[in-house]
Image: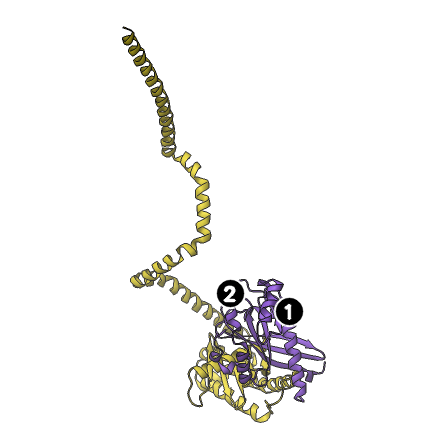
Chain colours: A purple, B yellow
Amino acid sequence: MDSSKWISKKIALLGSHAVGKTSLISQFVEQKFPESYLTTIGLKVDKKSVEVDDYTVDMVIWDIAGQDNLAQIPHYYINGCSGIIYVIDITRPSTFEDLGAKIEMIKGMAKDAEIIVTANKKDLLSAEELEATLANIEPRPQFATSAKFGENVEELFHSLAENMIKSHESQGA
Amino acid sequence: MMQSSTSYDAEKMLLELRHLLHMEDANLRDRLEEKLHALEEAFQDDALLKERMAPYLETHVAFLQENFPGLFGKYLGAAIQLQIRESQDEIIDALYPIIGKLIAKFIKTEIEKISQKIDQRLANPFSFKAIKQRLQSIFTGVPLEEIMLRDTALAKLEEVFLIRKLDGLLMGHYSLNEVSNPDMVGGMLTGIKQFMEHAFEKQNQELDTLTYDRYKIRVFNFNTYFVAAVIEGPSQARFQNDLQDFVYKFVEKYDVYTDQPITKELNDQLSADLKIHFDGFKQVDK
């Protein structure tokens, strides 16, 4: 492989507390779902490589402790992020209230980052309930995931890697 | 006369009826007495009582075992807290021998390790290092044992991380041993560093040392990146100064550009540079 096409990117997972950020990372990195809930204190960093076309992307994933108020997230944890996954809990409307404003705020904090929104815990709703709930969320999340059963988790991170590569190429790097 | 005979018959019938009713009552009473007696016996007979109660007790004990933390956790916690608060001296007296033994065991193990290292060196008295130590002892007047002890307790440079400040991404890495995931270590180091610097915000001040057990992480800050050096063992001022000189010489000698994407190519190049440079430090250290 051309080692110039092997790149490292920092990504961060944001969202309210207990929406499943750590579980999504655990499922993606280790294919495991932590059965007991342990709140993230401060920060945890993980890493996984993803193959996208002829690129290898080393995703260095910053799991930042959940905050209901985005303004309270330490800005220095988000500095330099190439990708951000904003996680909501599809069963808790409070986690996706004012979603549009929150996304705008994140764009202001991480100007060059690709942002993807995922509605996690889809396994807790029926297909009809999920569709009805998603239809009422503005902007509609690009993904609906289940960290518990691994549904769409790989696709979520892969899609972010693809977006980051497109952005990387468009910058002429 | 007729009236008198009728009255007599009615009275007789009444007596018979009463007798019959009494008999039924008496039978009922007798049966109850028997049952009561059996119950009394059952309660007084320990073996029988145990046998009857055993299944219920087992079920209840299992229930308590399963739900103990939920049922009694808060009472136990409160009781222990109260006990600790009110009987600090007694608790210290009780724990002291155990903690004392642990500390003694730890010290003994550490002394054994040092002793083994010294024995290994004594077993090879004609090695370059042994001859050097003997000569050093003769010329300086410092006892040979002290020189050997000092050399045994020398600090060792274990790893060097070159990290971009903006995003905490690892630009290069040098290690004596294979580390499971230097990218994660680099990220966490950056996170901790950023947290410390913002939590205790002072103008132009940056974190320069982290200590963990026998390890010390020295952080050398530059404009857009930092170098984190992991040192094992007690490092003296001379070691610290030498290390600082080595880091500054690396920065002078090699180009570290932080404004380009971090590729494997760049990482491999900087890691190779770090190896060439800090292998030299290892030799000085020895």
Q: Amino acid at mark 1?
A: Asn
Mark carried by residue B217: none
Q: Residue at x 62, y 89 (%)?
A: B260
Characterize the local packing of mark 1: few (<14), some (14-19) or many (20 or more) Cα atoms within 10 angstroms. some
B221 in relation to A70, above or below? below
Of labels 2 and 1, earlier in sequence is 2
Look at mark 1 in the image and give the residue it sits on: A152
Q: Nearer the viewer, residue A49 or A28?
A: A28
- Residue A144 sits in which quadrant? bottom right
Classed neighbour count for the residue bearing mark 2: other residues with Cα under 10 Å, few (<14), some (14–19), many (≥20): few
Total labels drawn: 2
The label nearer to you, 2 versus 1, is 1
Tell me where residue A172 sits by quadrant: bottom right
**Residue B120 x/y as whole percent:** 53, 73
For the residue labelled by badge 1, is the local secondary structure a helix, a strand or a loop?
Answer: loop
Chain ID, mark 1: A
Q: Which image quarter is the C terminus of chain A in?
A: bottom right
Residue marked by disc 2: A37
Question: Where residue B223 appears, x then y in whole percent?
Answer: 52, 91
Q: Would residue B234 be seen by someone viewing this image from the given angle?
A: no
